[in-house]
Image (tube, rainbow, N blue to C red):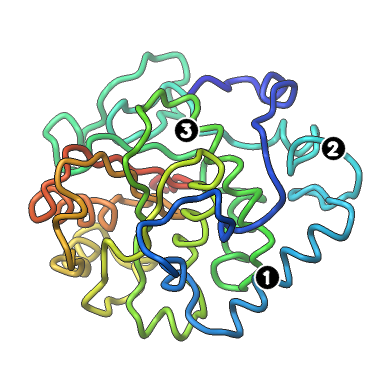
């Protein structure tokens, strides 16, 4: 990505609108009320709308240190911006894995991509899954603190701009199983996708992919277990909506890539998508 220097990014921040989570009409959708699958209940929708109203009415605070008035254009103050662990070169040009142990090497394929194991064409993550960003992801995903969605998407927007990828024909979030969606109250990937689509002015659909099996949480599983866990999990109700189109998958965290890979596989094999790319807020590296 192009923003290797946080100071440069701070001097030229992306254009951002009000902190809305992608419900606005500027993010086109393929189906009326298609945003509903991102919210599992009326209660979560009200919490989401409430967090937006509070954000609009009160002075903006930094998403990192939460100081008020420490910045003007970005969701992050300059001091926190300097500490953001960007997922930058050298990295794998296909899956986007950063080579943090060899910072002076050129971009090169990682071991998994030398003999391709991924079905997506390329993938990128904005930052490493650590520090305050990791905390905000967890607060957003598991604590329903939805005010963190726009600052997280801001990081994705910067990564996307440096990626140089042609504009997607359609943005698609990784879906949750209906039961888990009801339990959590919202799909974090759906909310990220809606806000991201609004920012880059691309169409988004929340029902292209469905999760037909309720799988175990991937967090504590090995790579082999993750592969088995998501195998055959996703389905496309109407393949005609995907055929010949460039799809951009959105998720919150890239760990092993198994979930994104399974989504990409069904989009290409059944949906006949021309290209499938993936973007996440963070990239978790092996410990």
Residue annotated with mark 3: 160
Task: Give the alpha-carbon distance from disc 2 to disc 3, as whole Å.
Answer: 23 Å
Q: Is residue 77 left or right of residue 255?
A: right
> Helix, strand or loop at disc 1?
helix
For the residues marked 1 and 2, what is the alpha-carbon distance in whole angstroms?
24 Å
- Nearer-N-terminus badge (2/3): 2
As drawn, 145 above or below 173: below
Report the side of 114 relative to 50 (left or right).
left
> Can the viewer see residue 5 in this picture?
yes
Q: Which residue is mark 1?
A: 49
Residue picked out by circle 2 = 71
Q: Residues within 10 Å of mark 2 (few under 14, many from 20)?
A: some
Q: Earlier in the sequence, mark 3 or mark 1?
A: 1
SS assignment at label 2: loop
In the image, residue 68 sits, relative to residue 157, either above or below, namely: below
Asked which secondary structure carries label 3, the reply is: helix
Whole-number angstrom distance, CA of label 3 to CA of label 1: 26 Å
Quadrant of the image occupied by residue 91: top left
Percent across and percent down for residue 226 are 24, 63
- Near mark 3 (Cα within 10 A), the count class, few <14, some 14-19 or many ≥20, is many
Q: Is residue 127 visible?
A: no
Mark 1 or mark 2, earlier in chain: 1
Q: Name above or below for residue 133 compared with residue 116.
A: below
- Vertical placement of residue 119 versus 25, above or below: above
């Amino acid at each position: 990505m192009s923003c290797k220097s946080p100071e440069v990014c701070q001097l030229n921040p992306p254009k951002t609108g009000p902190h809305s989570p992608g419900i606005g009409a500027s993010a086109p959708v393929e189906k009326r009320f298609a945003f509903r699958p991102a919210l599992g209940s009326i209660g979560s929708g009200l919490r989401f709308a409430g967090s937006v109203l509070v954000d609009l009415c009160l002075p903006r605070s930094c998403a990192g240190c939460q100081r008020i008035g420490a910045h003007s254009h970005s969701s992050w103050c300059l001091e926190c911006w300097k500490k953001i662990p960007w997922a930058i070169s050298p990295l794998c040009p296909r899956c986007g894995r950063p080579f943090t142990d060899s910072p002076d090497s050129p971009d090169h394929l990682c071991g998994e991509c030398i003999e391709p194991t991924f079905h997506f064409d390329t993938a990128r993550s904005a930052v490493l899954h650590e520090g305050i960003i990791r905390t905000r992801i967890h607060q957003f995903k598991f604590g329903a603190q939805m005010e963190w969605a726009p600052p997280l998407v801001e990081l994705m927007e910067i990564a996307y701009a440096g990626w140089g990828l042609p504009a997607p024909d359609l943005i698609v979030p990784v879906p949750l199983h209906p039961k888990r969606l009801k339990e959590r109250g919202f799909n974090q990937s759906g909310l990220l996708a809606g806000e991201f689509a609004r920012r880059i002015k691309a169409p988004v659909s929340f029902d292209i992919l469905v999760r037909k099996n309720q799988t175990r949480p991937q967090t504590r599983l090995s790579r082999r277990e993750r592969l088995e866990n998501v195998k055959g999990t996703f389905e496309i109700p109407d393949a005609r909506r995907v055929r010949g189109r460039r799809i951009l998958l959105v998720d919150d965290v890239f760990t092993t890539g198994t979930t994104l890979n399974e989504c990409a596989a069904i989009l290409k094999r059944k949906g006949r998508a021309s290209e499938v790319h993936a973007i996440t807020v963070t990239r978790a590296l092996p410990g």
